[in-house]
Image (cartoon, helix red, strand yellow):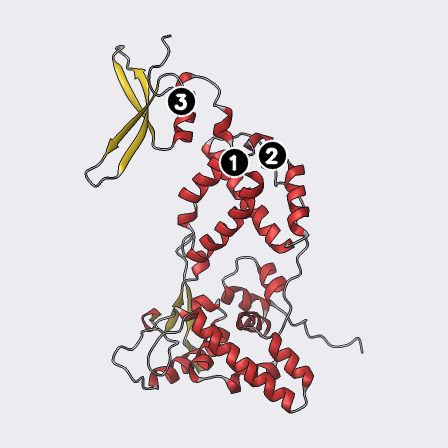
Amino acid sequence: MRPKSTHRDLPPRMLRRVRTMKSGKVWESYFYNGRDASGRRIEIPLGHDLNEAKRKWAELECQDRPPETGLMRYIFDRYEREILPTKAVSTQRENLGCLGKLRKVFDGAPIDAITPQFIAQYRDKRGAVAPVRANREITLFSHVFNMAREWGYTARENPVKGVRKNKETPRDFYADAAVWDAVYGAACVELRDAMDLNYLTGQRPADVLKMRYSDIRDGALEVKPNKTQKSSGKKLRILLDDPDTGRTMLGQLIDRIRARARDTKLTSMCIVATPAGAALNQWTLRTRFDDARDTAAKAAEKAGDMALAKRIREFQFRDIRPKAASETDLAHASKLLGHTDKQITKTVYQRVGETVLPTK
């Protein structure tokens, strides 16, 4: 075969086409210089990504894929390009941080060279600094590897399989009545609304902040958790009226908020909002909660109750969801929190031990 006179950086019969668009943007793509059934020359598109183009070229040539096309950097790139955008914004942010750590170690490694031993070594070295983060990074690597198997980069078994994770201790802080009442008493009106709504619905803080009056339909507050909105269309309907006892505490809360006049014509439709009608976000909520907690802790210290002050300072807004789960039975808590597995509710969210009578 005659040596190539152009595109010498590309494999035989692989072509690069470059065009400058009217907008000034440069368009670049790759093609296979092939033949159709009648022997006529055709150019078969291989795509815009050089690494993927080389993989497709190898299939057309019935050759082994070039070794460099199996480097983890290309797989990370594809995962970041195709999979990350399908996730929630907060998950994308977390995954990008994990990918940054993984790339430092695995970017230049061929996928078929990665063994469980390398994963264990990564766990131990990262675990010495950030054991929980190391677990999250290994979990993400496992998903990246599984996607690489689907894409055809490798047929090997996932090296993460069977590798132990670093031990994690779930947070076990429980906001008892004394802690709750102290912070609640120091809270502004919108923070009290947020605390009540969080406790009565058992949802995540981000989901509480996005609850709107338009989510109230047919006597129920419809909740669609951020964590599952892309993976399923399931919604949770939390009743505002109990068929046996009448208006629920959640219904009474919403009635109370609705009855409160808001000052501006540009009133937010969010249930949790300031008296002026502005919706809260995670930062304004945190500022208000931190201020209330600090005020409550100082009041407890002034009263000489240092133990209570210490517990108050440990209280975080995210502890309200576990408080809701801890103060009802397991079956109800699991449904309210949207868990399909009751064990997750019991292990992670229920932070009060079961109450039993003594032997005698």
Circles 3 and 1 in contact, beta carbons < 8 Å = no
Q: Nearer the viewer, residue 114 or 221?
A: 114
Q: CA distance from mark 3 to mark 1?
A: 21 Å
Of the image marks 2 and 3, the number of the one nearer the N terminus? 3
Q: How many marks?
A: 3
- Label 2, on which residue? 114
Spot occupied by residue 60 in the image (x, y as percentages of width and height): 39, 19
- Label 1, on which residue? 72
Where does the C terminus fall, quadrant-wise?
Answer: bottom right
Within 10 Å of disc 1 (Cα), the crowding (few <14, some 14-19, many 20+) is many
**SS assignment at label 2:** loop
Q: Quadrant of residue 111?
A: top right
Q: Nearer the viewer, residue 343 or 95?
A: 95
Q: Which mark is residue 49?
A: none
- Label 3, on which residue? 9
Extreme-left residue of the structure: 22
Kind of residue at badge 1: Met
Q: Nearer the viewer, mark 2 or mark 3?
A: 3
Extreme-top residue of the structure: 1
Kind of residue at badge 2: Ile
| Residue 244 is at least partly visible in this image | no
Within 10 Å of disc 3 (Cα), the crowding (few <14, some 14-19, many 20+) is few
Of the image marks 1 and 2, the number of the one nearer the N terminus? 1
Kind of residue at badge 3: Asp
Extreme-bottom residue of the structure: 303
| Residue 285 is at least partly visible in this image | yes
Circles 1 and 2 in contact, beta carbons < 8 Å = yes
Location of residue 297 with respect to 61 vertically, above or below = below
Question: For the point 37% across and 75% down, which residue is it?
Answer: 271
Q: CA distance from mark 2 to mark 3?
A: 28 Å
